Image (tube, helix red, strand yellow):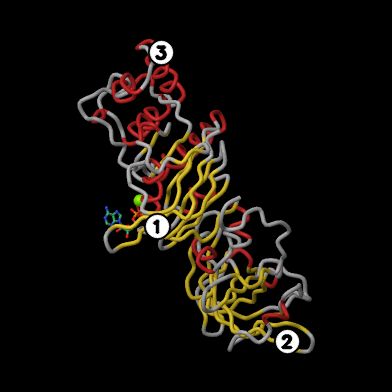
Amino acid sequence: MSEIQLQQLVKKYDDVTAVKGIDLNVRDGEFLVLVGPSGCGKSTTLRMVAGLEDVTDGTLQIGGNVVNDVAPKERSIAMVFQNYALYPHMTAAQNMKFGMKSASDFSSAEIDERVENAAETLSVTDLLDRKPKELSGGERQRVAIGRALVREPEVFLLDEPLSNLDAKLRVQMRAELLKLHQDLSTTTIYVTHDQTEAMTLGDRVAVMDDGVLQQVAPPQELYDYPANRFVAGFIGEPSMNVFPVTVRRQNGQCVAEHSGFTITLPEREGLDDIAGVEADFGVRPEDITLAENLSAATETFKAEVTVREPLGELLLLHCRLGDEELQVKVEPRSQIQPGDKIEVGFNKERLHLFDMTDGDALYHSTPQETTSDPITAE
Ligand SMILES: Nc1ncnc2c1ncn2[C@@H]1O[C@H](COP(=O)(O)OP(=O)(O)OP(=O)(O)O)[C@@H](O)[C@H]1O
Ligand SMILES: [Mg+2]
């Protein structure tokens, strides 16, 4: 078993607290993605798990053993870095097996066999005799991943391993990493600031901001039920539309009232508790639909198109609704132009309200059936 448990993990550098008491259980065999904006403490967290940074406070367990004071090479982990960290004077094969002999009881033949297997898995067999400068970025990254594979560790730690690659190669390597994990099921923590990578790779995704974990959940759950305004804005491209409203009861119905428009909120338990409060209303661009595609009974709003952004698979319209900016995804071949007035309705199953002060979610219009993960442990 190689689950990883972080309990109230803290990292302080002099006057900076980079990681502020994180609780996280990574299950045996799980692919967990740690995502968040630059500087939020992702690498620091990963480096503590690797043993490359001391833990200031809290407990770190791997496979049920406390490893706070265990040396990196005793932790059965292998780490892949953003900058590959290959030795320039060694060939790919030498890089992959470097340090294996001293760190293990393997014979040269066994190590060679592992290098061959890893090279085959990653399609770099023909490149094994080349030095890093004779390899492309993608090939170097494969070699760096190969070096981790050769160790057959219990835990893989990857810190933005794809960010030096061009967009196309990144998508290809992403699929290869998924396949690799399907084959090996090695417990993995993968750090990225790219929410698309997080959504596509993670069994679960841990969203971090300013040294604090915001939510840990499977990708679709994060998307549909963001625990707070930060997660709602961070996950999803383009971001969820958010604007201030007052929640009120009006003629027996609950409404979100903005200075320029009023939206009826689907009834659900707990809605009365927030009647009367000011809140941030959230709706994703794909949950706004042109009125012509809605049933006649649906409540609609008039918006003015300001910018038209064709994205190939869809057309993104920037609009003004009252004095708010609203982004709307429509079908890509639509001829709607800037200056046009459009009539839109909201998908009533996908409305959100967030506390104006602390940003916590107050309401999702579709109730969440099961909470798979409270923010902390299991
Ligand atoms: N050795 C250090 N000494 C002092 N402060 C540090 C040190 N390493 C990191 N920090 C600070 O800790 C915070 C978290 O840094 P960290 O590298 O973990 O961020 P990150 O989430 O990995 O960001 P990025 O996406 O840019 O890689 C930052 O404010 C950073 O400046
Ligand atoms: Mg980092």
Check if mark 3's residue and mark 2's residue have beta carbons within 8 Å.
Answer: no
Q: Which amino acid does label 1 sit on?
A: Val
Percent position of residue 143, x then y: 35, 29
Q: Which of 178 and 104 is in front in this view?
A: 104
Q: Which amino acid does label 2 sit on?
A: Arg
Q: Which amino acid does label 3 sit on?
A: Glu
Please, what secondary structure does the residue beneath circle 3 have?
helix
Q: Nearer the viewer, residue 140 or 59?
A: 59
Dot 3 alpha-carbon crowd within 10 angstroms: few under 14, some 14 to 19, many 20 or more = few
**Residue marked by disc 3:** 110
Upstream in sequence: badge 1 or badge 2: 1
Q: Residue 19 carries which label?
A: 1
Dot 1 alpha-carbon crowd within 10 angstroms: few under 14, some 14 to 19, many 20 or more = many
**Residue marked by disc 2:** 249
Check if mark 1's residue and mark 2's residue have beta carbons within 8 Å.
Answer: no
Residue at 63% x, 60% y: name it: 224
Percent position of residue 110, x then y: 40, 13
Furthest toward the top, the residue is: 109
